[in-house]
Amino acid sequence: MLKTSENPPCVWPEAESIAEFEGTWWVAHTKSRNEKALARRMHNKSISYFLPMHWKVSRKRGRTFRSLIPLFAGYVFFCGDEKDRLEVLKTNRVANIIVVNDQQGLVSDLCPIERLIRQGADLRPHKYIKAGQKCRVIAGALMGAEGIVSRSSGRTRLVLQVEMLGQATSVEVETDFVEVID
């Protein structure tokens, strides 16, 4: 298990938003449990990437452990040119590279997730929802973000989906801050 300081940053380069990354977006489908190692290699090669992560708390033998784990297990998003794509393939940590046909769509899906991570929101993996009401946040830090509302343990959560992966994440929202999109 890595110390907190040994984890790669979620976004590289850290000062930029992923919306400002230049180049073509790809999704690296990693070999099992290789997301952070791949991100460290990309960091060392100055390849722009986004690896959304969240804290998982577990107990073992009476001790509590906190682990920073990928939000979308098995995937690292990266942006660059053909040379960068080949560098990622050379790492031997990738099972497949997924071509992103809708570049702007992927960035639009990922930007609210990046914003929440930078704000320290408590994100966690969520089942991808195909049915449900599509909603827009009308107030607060997520104003303008669109997603599907779900209820979990009596709380309202906004599900933010990454269409091309068929995966999603969710964040708790105030019901008053959400409006239904027709």
Image (cartoon, rainbow, N blue to C red):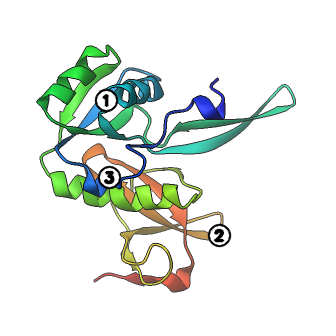
Amino acid type, residue under disc 3 in the picture? Ile
Q: Which residue is mark 1?
A: 29
Mark 3 lies on a secondary structure that is helix
Vertical position of residue 37 compared to residue 156: above or below: above
Mark 2 lies on a secondary structure that is loop
Describe residue 160's horizontal placement relative to residue 99 as left or right.
right
**Residue at the extreme right of the image, as rendered:** 62
Amino acid type, residue under disc 2 in the picture? Gly
Q: Which residue is mark 2?
A: 154
Q: Which residue is mark 3?
A: 18
| For discs 2 and 1, the disc positioned in front in the rendered view | 1
Q: CA distance from mark 1 to mark 3?
A: 19 Å
Q: Counting other residues with Cα less than 10 Å from the Cα at mark 3, is it few (<14), some (14-19), or many (20 or more)?
A: many
Q: Quadrant of the N terminus?
A: top right
Give whichever of 60, 121 is nearer the camera: 121
Q: Position of residue 103 (x, y in %)?
A: 16, 51
Vertical position of residue 87 compared to residue 179: above or below: above
| For discs 1 and 3, the disc positioned in front in the rendered view | 3
